[in-house]
Image (cartoon, rainbow, N blue to C red):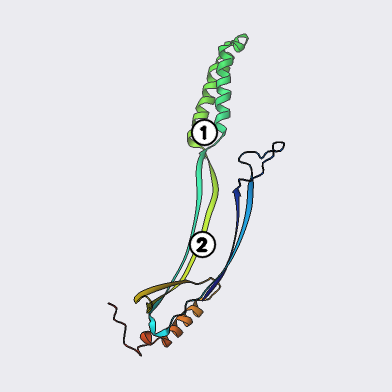
Amino acid sequence: MDSTKNTLYTLQKANLQGNSAITPFRKGETYQTVATITDDLWFKPLPLPTITGVEIYTSHRSEASQYIANRVAPYWLFSLVVGLIGYLLAAAGIYSSLDSGLEIILGVVLPTLLLVLATYLFVAKAQVKAYSSINSVTKSREIRIGAYDPIHNRPTYISMKVEDSQPLASIFHWCRELQDHSPRLSGNQDPLILM
């Protein structure tokens, strides 16, 4: 009915014995790798008269998302630093040897304009940055079979996952063959009355 080979590789911390006093293991830095290969074979005979229902469930879903941030452009910082340096130079008296008109322009007007420019750049100008996108595609193909279990004397339900390599047409064909040859699904036998 089903055969699946699963391979699992894990890296885990190990507690090794035989620690040496000369070359001891460093605490928390000893690991071991484990490779597990499982080959399962599952077979469940279903007598055709016990099958009470069959359905196919398929779901294909894809999702994509992109994270985009509108960040403040970095130029405002340069304008702010130059404006503050202009105020500091004026306060230190560096411009005092210049003409008074030029001193006012370099010590007050120019730094004030640079601070206004820094505020404008901070508020108005932005830099769009796109971060890593997430793309996911999920497929699910499942055949559900309802049957009556004569051993436990109760209805049972079997769910089979179908691999992507199987085309949908072959899945439908398999279920149609199951329905045509099951007496309770094809109408050749009275339905089960479950108590």
Does 73 sit left or right of 144 as displayed? right
User: Where is 106 relative to 144, above or below?
Assistant: above
Q: Position of residue 92 (x, y in %)?
A: 58, 11
Q: Can the viewer see residue 105 in this picture?
A: no
Does 130 sit left or right of 185 as displayed? right
| Count of numbered tags | 2
User: Where is 107 relative to 114, above or below?
Assistant: above
**Could you say whether the residue bearing mark 2 is in a helix, strand or loop?**
strand
Q: Can the viewer see residue 19 in this picture?
A: yes
Which label was assigned to residue 135? Answer: none
**Foreground pick, 37 / 176:** 37
Image quarter for residue 48? Answer: bottom left
Which label was assigned to residue 137? Answer: 2
**Could you say whether the residue bearing mark 1 is in a helix, strand or loop?**
helix
Q: Which residue is mark 1?
A: 121
Does 27 sit left or right of 2 as displayed? right
User: Where is 187 relative to 111, above or below?
Assistant: below
Q: Residue furthest right?
A: 22
What's the residue at 52%, 25% (across, down)? 115
Mark 1 neighbour class, 10 Å CA radius: few under 14, some 14 to 19, many 20 or more: some
Q: Contact, CB < 8 Å: mark 1 with mark 2? A: no
Q: Position of residue 112 (x, y in %)?
A: 51, 22
**Foreground pick, 120 / 33:** 33
Q: Position of residue 27 (x, y in %)?
A: 62, 38
Mark 2 neighbour class, 10 Å CA radius: few under 14, some 14 to 19, many 20 or more: few
Q: Amino acid at mark 1?
A: Leu
Q: Position of residue 16 (x, y in %)?
A: 63, 46
Report how far apart the C-alphas of labels 1 and 2 lie in the structure.
Answer: 41 Å
**Foreground pick, 18 / 14:** 18
Label located before the other in sequence (1 or 2): 1
Q: Residue furthest left?
A: 195
Q: Amino acid at mark 2?
A: Val
